[in-house]
């Protein structure tokens, strides 16, 4: 069985040098979001809770640009814009 | 007419898939950008099924059209389950099947009701679907959309890639505000137009920005993940029982989504399968599962696993699917602007149709713009004709017919949990030969079914199902 990491390795990305995803308010993630759905509903697992710094790590480089997080964040706390033209995911099949 | 922003190696893109774009190419694109005229009659945002159908129809109709795509070529960001419908595509480009890059004409559609370890199946096969004008095809968007974008350019439209529309230009008048163009993320990136057609897809950022779509909730959208899996030569014909070149679709409900409201699918391509699953975002949130886990579980189901034996995964993709239905369709027009395709929520989830609604909406929007140009009026008074055309077409008629489907399935999870199990129990009991009389078997089934869900509840479910889908 393929792991998600194996599958993401097959996808072509052209990562920009700055993120197209921002968490609006880190405090909300820490104090007002016990379930943190972004950490599991994202098909590419871009979001990861970092216990040390008490914040969500955003691995925007592997974003598949579906938009699930924009609608699935229960605190509406994810600012997501399209990556700059020519950057981001580049599907071979689609 | 012209292609801007395209990589110089565009035609040899297959070979350059793995290469990293040189910075000089970016600069070159920026130079080309400076040559793009600053004014068009129509701007189409997004080169997917809706945008391509719109831009092609506009160009053919003599409208000076700019098609803006954020990917490095049209199709590079586009994802769907994998079925293109012949009729609406033929309406835009006649006899497209003679030259378009297609995978397989579909001759058989199957529906699988999955329970643990078992499957109840139903299907329809007709070799007549293998003849012109065909019914539908499996396709890859990155190939088909690139082909259709080239046809659109041949028809006279201007295409600019690697460009993101971030905002709009407005024309303020005493009594109204009219969209008068777009702002892109390029330097000096403003382009004016009489009308803008938003074909941005399901993640409808621009439609929301205009206030035409309210904030969507996670109950209005599904997330779909898909894998493209290469199979050994001849495996598709053998495993799916079809003649060479013919295709099959399978829709899977029940256990395929771990009991969540959604659907799985398996589509045959030339030498690959498109296998995926879509589940409502709110239900996925509650489940605590990752969509890839749902897909992996479906791939391990005993009815699915043998189809994938010896397969090699080639790509993993994700997309959101508008499932809000008729009630969540945004306002489709305003002064100087029209909304098409997924951005307009035009998806018929019950029949897993989307690309056909997108293409039809793009075509109808373009025809409305061609008329508006003749009248010289792009206000909402004229553009409302787009809404009326959609209302008179199958697009909004079908969405209206199933207007309560999403609510029914959201509030009645047993359609995806209990009923597949009961179907399994009943079928297994009925088909097991063990010298128990059929009458006693029927009694046993009846007893089991009614002990799991009361007879009046079942009657109520069936009535609601018939009222909603019938």
Image (spheres, helix red, strand yellow):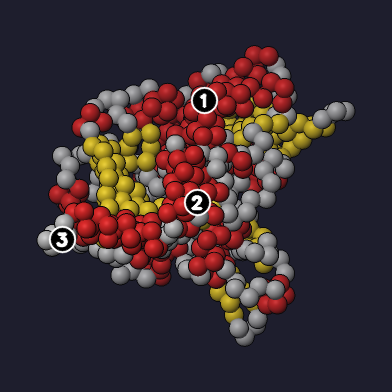
**Pointer 2: residues within 10 angstroms few (<14), some, or many (20+)?**
some
Residue highlighted by disc 3:
B436
Q: Secondary structure at mark 3?
A: loop
Alpha-carbon span between mark 3 and mark 2: 37 Å
Determine whether, in the image, residue B211 is placed left or right of residue B101. Answer: right
**Which residue is outermost to the top?**
B374
Give residue B141's quadrant in the image.
Answer: top left
Determine whether, in the image, residue A76 is placed left or right of residue B396. Answer: right
Q: Which of pointers 1 and 3 lies earlier in the amino acid sequence?
A: 1
Mark 1 or 2: in front is 2
**Which residue is outermost to the bottom?**
A52
Which chain does tag 2 point to?
B
Alpha-carbon span between mark 1 and mark 2: 26 Å
**Pointer 3: residues within 10 angstroms few (<14), some, or many (20+)?**
few
Decide: marks 1, 3 in contact (CB < 8 A)?
Answer: no
Residue B319 visible (yes or no): no
Instruction: Name above or below for residue B121 compared with residue A52.
Output: above
How far across and how far down the image is residue B329, in percent? 61, 39
Residue B241 or residue B455, whichever sits in front: B455
Q: Share a chain, discs 1 and 3?
A: yes
Instruction: Please give the label number shown on residue B393.
Output: 1
Residue for point 51% across, 34% down: B401
Which chain does tag 3 point to?
B
Residue highlighted by disc 2:
B409
Residue for point 69% across, 40% down: B212
Residue B39 or residue A68, whichever sits in front: A68
Mark 3 or 2: in front is 3
Q: Secondary structure at mark 1?
A: loop
Q: Which of pointers 1 and 2 lies earlier in the amino acid sequence?
A: 1
Residue for point 62% across, 85% down: A52
Which chain does tag 1 point to?
B
Decide: marks 3, 2 in contact (CB < 8 A)?
Answer: no
């Amino acid at each position: 069985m393929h792991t998600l990491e194996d599958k993401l390795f097959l996808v072509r990305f052209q990562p920009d040098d700055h993120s197209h995803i921002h968490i609006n308010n880190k405090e909300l993630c820490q104090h007002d979001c016990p379930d943190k759905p972004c950490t599991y509903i994202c098909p590419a697992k871009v979001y990861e809770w970092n216990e040390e710094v008490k914040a969500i790590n955003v691995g925007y480089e592997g974003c598949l640009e579906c938009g699930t997080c924009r609608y699935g964040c229960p605190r509406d706390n994810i600012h997501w814009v399209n990556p700059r033209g020519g950057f981001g995911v580049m599907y071979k099949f689609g | 007419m012209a292609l801007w922003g395209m990589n110089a190696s565009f035609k040899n893109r297959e070979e350059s898939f793995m290469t990293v774009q040189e910075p000089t190419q970016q600069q070159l694109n920026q130079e080309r950008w400076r040559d793009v005229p600053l004014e068009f009659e129509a701007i189409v945002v997004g080169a997917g099924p809706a945008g391509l159908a719109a831009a092609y129809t506009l160009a053919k109709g003599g409208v000076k059209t700019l098609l803006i795509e954020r990917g490095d070529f049209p199709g590079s960001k586009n994802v769907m389950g994998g079925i293109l419908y012949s009729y609406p595509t033929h309406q835009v480009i006649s006899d497209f099947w003679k030259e378009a890059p297609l995978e397989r004409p579909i001759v058989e559609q199957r529906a699988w009701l999955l329970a643990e370890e078992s499957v109840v199946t139903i299907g329809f096969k007709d070799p007549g679907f293998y003849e012109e004008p065909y019914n539908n095809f499996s396709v890859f968007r990155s190939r088909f959309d690139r082909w259709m974008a080239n046809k659109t350019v041949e028809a006279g439209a201007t295409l600019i890639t690697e460009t993101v529309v971030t905002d709009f230009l407005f024309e303020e008048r005493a009594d109204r505000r009219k969209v008068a163009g777009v702002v892109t993320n390029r330097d000096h990136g403003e382009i004016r137009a009489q009308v803008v057609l938003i074909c941005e897809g399901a993640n409808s950022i621009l439609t929301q920005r205009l206030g035409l779509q309210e904030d969507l909730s996670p109950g209005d959208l599904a997330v779909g993940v898909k894998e493209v899996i290469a199979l050994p030569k001849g495996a598709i014909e053998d495993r799916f029982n079809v003649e060479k070149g013919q295709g099959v679709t399978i829709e899977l409900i029940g256990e395929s989504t771990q009991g969540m409201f959604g659907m799985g699918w398996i589509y045959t391509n030339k030498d690959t399968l498109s296998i995926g699953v879509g589940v409502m975002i709110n239900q996925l949130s509650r489940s605590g599962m990752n969509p890839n886990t749902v897909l992996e579980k479906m791939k391990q189901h005993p009815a699915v696993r043998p189809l994938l034996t010896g397969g090699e995964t080639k790509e993993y993709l994700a997309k959101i699917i508008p499932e809000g239905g008729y009630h969540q369709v945004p306002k489709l027009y305003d002064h100087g602007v029209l909304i098409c395709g997924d951005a307009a929520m035009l998806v018929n989830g019950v029949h897993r149709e989307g690309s056909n609604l997108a293409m039809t909406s793009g075509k109808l929007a373009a025809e409305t713009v061609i008329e508006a140009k003749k009248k010289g009026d792009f206000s909402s008074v004229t553009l409302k004709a787009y809404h009326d055309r959609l209302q008179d077409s199958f697009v909004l008629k079908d969405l209206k017919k199933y207007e309560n489907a999403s609510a029914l399935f959201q509030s009645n999870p047993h359609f995806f949990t209990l009923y597949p199990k009961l179907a399994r129990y009943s079928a297994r009991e009925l088909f097991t030969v063990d010298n128990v009389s059929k009458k006693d078997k029927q009694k046993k089934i009846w007893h089991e079914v009614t002990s799991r869900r009361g007879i009046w509840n079942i009657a109520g479910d069936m009535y609601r199902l018939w009222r909603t889908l019938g």
